[in-house]
Image (spheres, rainbow, N blue to C red):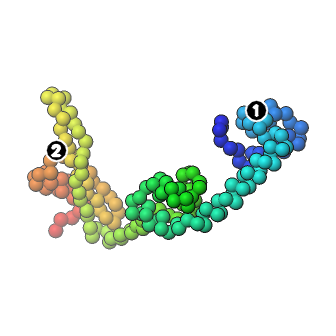
Amino acid sequence: MAGKELKMKIIDEILRLKSMGKSKRQISKILGIHRNTVSKYFENESNNIIKEEIKNSFCGIESWVEKIEWEKIREEVLQGVPIQIIHEELREKGKLEVLYPAFWKQLRKRMSLSKATMVRVFEPGSRCEIDYCDGINIIDVVTGEVLRTNFFVGVLCSSRYTFAEFTFSQKSEDFYILMLRCLNFLEVVLR
């Protein structure tokens, strides 16, 4: 907890426990914070100053948040500009005084950063999609040669029922064999 500011709730709890006559050591044990931290917030004068600083920092949030064009930032993020870069640019222009975590938190509160998605609905048995992708490397124990594989996947679009198998090539023969295995697995009736 070293170096971090305490939340107002914990500061109030320190003051409450102090008013109950608890010692600094007891308060640190109860709250699970270091005794020096309790000492820092134990004195009445420093508490008033700290409370005022915290209050001012919360008031400051509203001012910078209102100045930001959130919709413009959202468009930039969806175009692929990293949030860190946007934050740095706004700080360089003098439009932003806060650190990155505070900016990111406000950005997440104000907007969804994901693009819209669409769910496609298919009638059962009307569509099967297939594809290849890179597979895993296999080492031949006899020769020590590294063999590359391809990953074949077939999916029934309505139920998302899936067939997958590794193969050593994407040649026509392998493709036909995998298609037959896929259709048999998915129990598709060939007409």
The reply to whether residue 155 is in sight is yes
Is 135 or 80 nearer to us in this picture? 80
Q: Quadrant of residue 125?
A: bottom left
Is 74 situated above or below 38? below
Circle 2 packing at 10 Å, graded few (<14), some (14-19), many (20+), is some
**Mark 1 → mark 2, Cα distance in angstroms:** 65 Å
User: Quick one: SS at disc 1?
Assistant: helix
Q: Residue at x 75, y 45 (%)?
A: 10
In the image, taking residue 93 as reference, residue 1 lies left or right, namely right
Image location of residue 99, percent across then percent down: 57, 51
Is 104 situated above or below 72? above
Q: Residue at x 41, y 58 (%)?
A: 81
In the image, taking residue 96 as reference, residue 24 lies left or right, namely right
Is 68 situated above or below 175? below
User: What residue is shown with label 1?
Assistant: 35
The reply to whether residue 185 is in sight is no
Q: Earlier in the sequence, mark 1 or mark 2?
A: 1
Q: Residue at x 19, y 41 (%)?
A: 148
Image location of residue 130, percent across then percent down: 23, 59
User: Quick one: SS at disc 2?
Assistant: loop
Task: Say which amino acid is labelled 1.
Answer: Arg
User: What residue is shown with label 2?
Assistant: 168
Tell me the number on the disc at residue 50.
none
Q: Are marks 1 and 2 in contact (CB under 8 Å)?
A: no
Q: Quadrant of the N terminus?
A: top right
Task: Say which amino acid is labelled 2.
Answer: Phe
Q: Quadrant of residue 149?
A: top left
Is 76 or 123 nearer to us in this picture? 76
Circle 1 packing at 10 Å, graded few (<14), some (14-19), many (20+), is some
